[in-house]
Amino acid sequence: DVKVTQSSRYLVKRTGEKVFLECVQDMDHENMFWYRQDPGLGLRLIYFSYDVKMKEKGDIPEGYSVSREKKERFSLILESASTNQTSMYLCASQGYIGELFFGEGSRLTVL
Amino acid sequence: QQQVKQSPQSLIVQKGGISIINCAYENTAFDYFPWYQQFPGKGPALLIAIRPDVSEKKEGRFTISFNKSAKQFSLHIMDSQPGDSATYFCAAGGRAGATNKLIFGTGTLLAVQP
């Protein structure tokens, strides 16, 4: 079974702090994604990566950056957390027929 | 052109009934239409998917109906069970094999009453 592991399930941070969300997949997938999930808004794409050191902006990249130094690891970075970034963050890797495999999510609260 | 519109936002169905969730898309380049199921505290998981070369796909109690001309697709859950209570997301994307950015609907919270 594909396993996508997000390092932190729950985080509480203060406004202005730098936040790292880590994601690791074990299936050697090339494509990885970060989504944000908010009630009534569904899943919105923040960034994605199709190869090591390659990244592209999704629909809502403002306030976020990403890093992919190794194929299995894709990190989401909030340079200076703000209260409107309180949300559930979902990482996914993409299988060979287009299906996404999601981690269990990281719920971030910014105070 | 990138939106996927999903309805209803929430749905209550009696055990044994049929649950129907609808989605509409705009981009005619989309050719992959999956449905994801999400239980509380978990990430979404692929439930069933369809490509536009067929009008219907069935897996157990779950069926996707696809209307290419209307740019609509729907999920039908037959004989709905309390264990089906979850949030369902439709999605649409481009061709698999390339970078396939899935665009998700806003989700439907399904409650199946015993």
Image (spheres, rainbow, N blue to C red):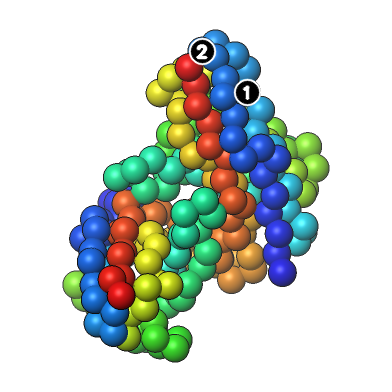
Q: Residue at x 54, y 14 (%)?
A: A14
Q: Which amino acid type corresponds to the residue marked 1 in the rendered image?
A: Val
Label 2 marks a residue whose chain is A
**What subunit carries mark 1?**
A
Q: From what the image shows, is residue A37 above or below residue B85?
A: above
Q: Quadrant of residue B16?
A: bottom left
Q: Disc number at residue A15?
A: 2
Q: Are marks 2 and 1 on the same chain?
A: yes
In the image, residue B110 lies at what x, y percent?
A: 31, 64
- Give how far across and how far down residue B73 sits, in percent: 28, 72
Circle 1 crowding by C-alpha within 10 Å: few under 14, some 14–19, many from 20? some
Where on the picture, by quarter, is residue A26?
A: bottom right
Secondary structure, mark 1, is strand
Quarter containing the N terminus of chain A: bottom right
The amino acid type of the residue labelled 2 equals: Thr
Q: Is residue B7 visible?
A: no
Q: Quadrant of residue A7?
A: top right
Label number found at residue B91: none
Neighbourhood count class around disc 2 (C-alpha, 10 Å): few under 14, some 14–19, many 20 upward: some
Residue A2 against residue A11 in the figure, above or below: below
The residue shown at (59%, 51%) is A104
Circle count: 2
Helix, strand or loop under label 2 = loop
* Residue at the disc numbered 1: A19
Image x and y of residue B13, in percent: 23, 72
